[in-house]
Image (spheres, helix red, strand yellow):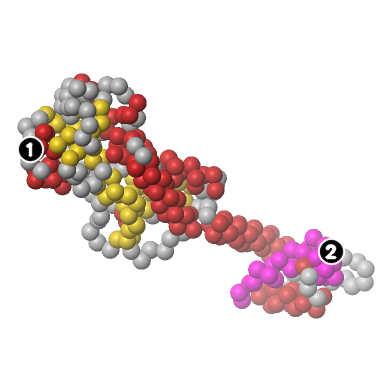
Amino acid sequence: MSAIELRHLATMAAIAEEGSFGRAATRLGYTQSTISQHVAALEKAVGGPVFDRPGGPRPVRITPLGAVVLEHGRDLLAGADALTGAVERFRAGDGRIDIGTFQSVSNVMVPTVVRRLREEHPDCDIRMTEEVPGQQPRIDDLDLLFYDGRLDGDVDHVKLLDDPYVLVARPGDFPAGPVRVGQLDGAPLVAYPPVCDQPRLELALARGGARPRIVFRSAGDDTILSMVRAGMGSAVLPWLAVHGSGVRFDDRLSVHELRPALAPREVFLLWQAGRSHSPLAARTIEIAVEAAADLVQQASHR
């Protein structure tokens, strides 16, 4: 059987519904000779007549072969319409996106990104995965990855923001105002596990003359802050973690700038190099950059 064209099936369906070649031509915007050509091509493809043509005012009748072709042809036409609709929705920004993230970004930035995507594309399918502390994230499984650093390999990125470190302690543990890094030497400290940016932070503290005693490690921001409230020690945390936990409204905790300031951790949005972005992924990058700029402005007024 020769290849069957969708336009010929569409013509056949119109004839069957209208009852004549002429009315089908009017409906589809073709000439009647074009309609006849489509039917002839279809009959050649399937190897037999699909319509009986009684002539005169009497309507054309579909043949048994034509009934089989029309039944399955309508399924093909419906599938083609569904495909066209899906492609149009994809181009408009719908579809699925898989995003990797980490805790403080999940608390502060990602909700803004998700809310705006939902507002613009209510039918989009957003899948989120939060990194497991201590494990290297698998960017090849994701469209985009929020990460506090860069990854080795063929990866492109946009830098979202610098996330400065601050000291969180109980009120009275340190005088009000900035705290010198050297004052943390030998002091009890609650900290993240030694992964991601934490080793660099601890090296920066050591270079600043501070070798605090790590008395507890946890990957959870809330857990670390609970231990600070309990008196286990102070904590040096990135601003996003502090901001996302509502510390500024907690009278059991005080926040201090460090002097000299430690180099901030860098927050990036990463993706596989050379990978074509869907419209939804491209819009997500734009929204993430805008949300990061808003956070930087908030941080400058804190």
Task: Quote the CA–CA distance across marks 1 and 2.
Answer: 89 Å
Tell me, yes or no, whether the two marked residues, 1 and 2, touch with CB atoms within 8 Å: no
Q: Nearer the viewer, mark 1 or mark 2?
A: 1
Q: Is residue 135 above or below residue 172?
A: below
Does residue 147 show up? no
Question: Which circle marks residue 211 in the picture?
Answer: 1
Depth check: 276 or 285 in front? 285
Percent x, y of residue 287: 45, 50
Q: Amino acid at mark 1?
A: Arg
Relative horizontal placement of residue 231, taking residue 51 as reference (left or right)? left
What type of secondary structure mainly makes up the magenta span?
helix
**Magenta-highlighted residues:** 1-27
Could you tell me which secondary element the residue under label 2 belongs to? loop
- Name the residue: 44% across, 42% down: 112
Q: Which mark is residue 19?
A: 2
Q: Residue at x 17, y 34 (%)?
A: 179
**Residue at horizontal 74 percent and vertical 68 percent from the top:** 11
Q: Decide: is 101 above or below 273.
A: above
Q: In the image, is 68 to the left or to the right of 273?
A: right
Where is the C terminus found, in terms of image quarters?
Answer: top left
Residue 25 inside the magenta-drawn segment: yes
Question: Label 1's element?
Answer: loop
Viewer-proximal residue, 44 or 104? 104
